[in-house]
Amino acid sequence: MSPDRAVLERALERGEQEGGSVEFKERLTRDLHLADGRLESLAAQLRHRVLSGDGEATYVVGVTDDGGLAGIPPAEFSESMDVLSLLAEEAGAHIEDVQTWGVPGRDGGADRGIVGVATVREGAMLDVDDQHIVVGTAGHVDHGKSTLVGSLVTGQPDDGEGGTRGFLDVQPHEVERGLSADLSYGVYGFDEDGPVHTLNPHRKQDRARVVEEADRLVSFVDTVGHEPWLRTTIRGLVGQKLDYGLLVVAADDGPTKTTREHLGILLATDLPTIVAITKADMVEEERLLEVEREVERLLRNADRTPLRIERHGVDTAIEEISEQVVPIVTTSAVTMEGLDVLDQLFERLPKTADGAGAFSMYIDRTYSVTGVGAVASGTIRSGTVAAGDELLVGPMADGGFREVEVRSIEMHYHRVDEARAGRIVGIALKGVREADLQRGMVLLPRDADPSAVWEFEAEVMVLNHPTRIGEGYEPVVHVETVSEAAAVYPEEGHLLPGDTGRARVRFKFRPYHVEAGQRFVFREGQSKGVGTITKVLPGD
Ligand code: GDP
């Protein structure tokens, strides 16, 4: 939780005033606040608040109308932020920053919930295009992730005491809406003369200048760092397009259980990943070599080929980096060792989220807009879509697909005629009601002949489990935007933590459209694992 309570206190003090820029909300829900009519009036209210605040409004969520600290559960807060981001989009604005605080229970007991302050700013989110690569970071807490990103984007060394990190107070919700560079915890760029740094990532003007000046942008989003938010962060990771993963391992601690887990998740999503060994200045040469060897072993155990950049050079790393080959670079944010190597990589690495082929999009959210009808939003996974296109959507609960037509396409509140892979869009559909749509359904071309899958075979790896996984173990499976309870039947009868093996996976409640080759994450309580679908099984 953010330490700077003053932000909250200031907002509460200013209070909700007629014609002011501060708005109090207890919570926002999809059902209530995105319903017909309501969405438009709330978006109009938001636009009003933004205008009153000279382009910036403050939404305090988790409070009563008169500013009492109510505190709401994290899941409700998360939904409120989702809804607020849609309202902002509708109003031609975006969420720029979210800070949260715990509200202690009565008598100082366990937290009753959280309260948060969202800053909403005029203008659309930063667009992601061919010259904008998005890097997902991961690693054990305190291993230097924020510091490394801070030093990269500012070009400034750290003092070893968290000086650079101070710029980048990463909040869980920035994670969830990760693809907006404004919300990511760092952005920098390159022009023909080299890096274009953000002098102070906290200053909006600085970020805006980088976006303006640079020919190529690199933004960093956190992916798997926040345990309580794992469900949503996993959605952020597998439901959206990242180009590269960056895993940090501190030279003093070396790889930990969390490091292994995070690596597993990054690799499970096919993300070409770079490992940065951080804090090289803190250890002797001998220890450094030892950690490098440990990292190499870790990668080999995960069936990957490590490539030490110090030995093979940046050119080779750029040529070879893939799902298979993982470059390793040794860095120190204090001496800036290795940061030039990362600069060169990020300046030259191609955008990977390719998206060639026929159109497909997994539905992330659905809503209904007056006069327009059902809208499905998500990130286009492959191909392009145009207004008037005839599509299929499904599977419905009975396994069937519905014929629909694209009425219109919105991208960040702008209407567009066509959109391609990687874009986050809202697609208005003719021929289906919003109530029939659901997260996890897929949109495909009319001639696709898709199947509704109840059961599939997979290669799985158990990252973490208190005991062994036996027949009929029931985690939640996350694949694309699907999050669904499933039963797992290991081929050998059981799987132990750290094991890799084959299993059959069966959705418990309804079928989805999944394909061989797709990666998934499964989770239940403390246990986590990753897998690849090897074969979809016919029948129901
Ligand atoms: P995160 O939790 O992974 O984001 O870790 P932080 O970036 O917050 O770093 C944790 C602590 O390690 C901070 O006090 C940093 O100043 C320190 N640190 C990070 N990188 C380095 C480094 O390269 N060298 C040294 N000496 N300290 C570092």
Image (cartoon, rainbow, N blue to C red):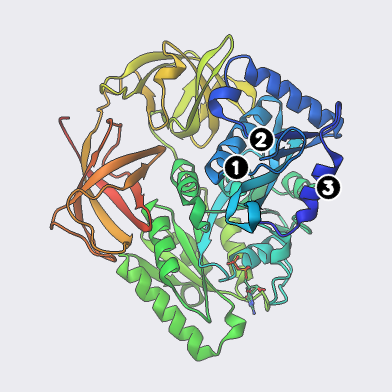
Between the residue at mark 3 and the residue at mark 1, the CA separation in whole angstroms equals: 20 Å
Residue 385 in picture, x, y percent from top left: 47, 23
Q: Amino acid at mark 3?
A: Arg
- Other-residue count near label 3 (Cα within 10 Å), few / some / many at <14 / 14–19 / ≥20: few
Q: Which mark is residue 72?
A: 1
Left or right of residue 147, residue 469 in this image = left
Between the residue at mark 2 and the residue at mark 1, the CA separation in whole angstroms equals: 8 Å
Q: Is residue 182 visible?
A: no
Picture quadrant of residue 156: bottom right
Q: Is residue 389 visible?
A: yes
Considering only order in the chain, which callout, 1 or 3, is on the residue closer to the N terminus?
3
Label 2 belongs to which residue? 26
Left or right of residue 269, residue 365 in this image = right
Q: Do callouts 3 and 1 mark residues in contact (Cβ within 8 Å)? A: no
Label 3 belongs to which residue? 10
Task: Decide which of 361, 59 is in the foreground and name it.
Answer: 59
- Secondary structure under tag 2 reads loop
Left or right of residue 259, residue 200 in this image = right
- Secondary structure under tag 3 reads helix
Residue lying at 68% horizontally and 63% vertically, measured from the top left: 150
Considering only order in the chain, which callout, 2 or 3, is on the residue closer to the N terminus?
3
Left or right of residue 260, residue 133 in this image = right
Q: Amino acid at mark 1?
A: Ile
Q: Point out the residue furthest to the left here.
A: 492
Task: Decide which of 240, 468 is in the foreground and name it.
Answer: 468
Picture quadrant of residue 68: top right
Q: Do callouts 2 and 1 mark residues in contact (Cβ within 8 Å)? A: yes
Considering only order in the chain, which callout, 1 or 2, is on the residue closer to the N terminus?
2
Q: Is residue 132 above or below residue 54?
A: below
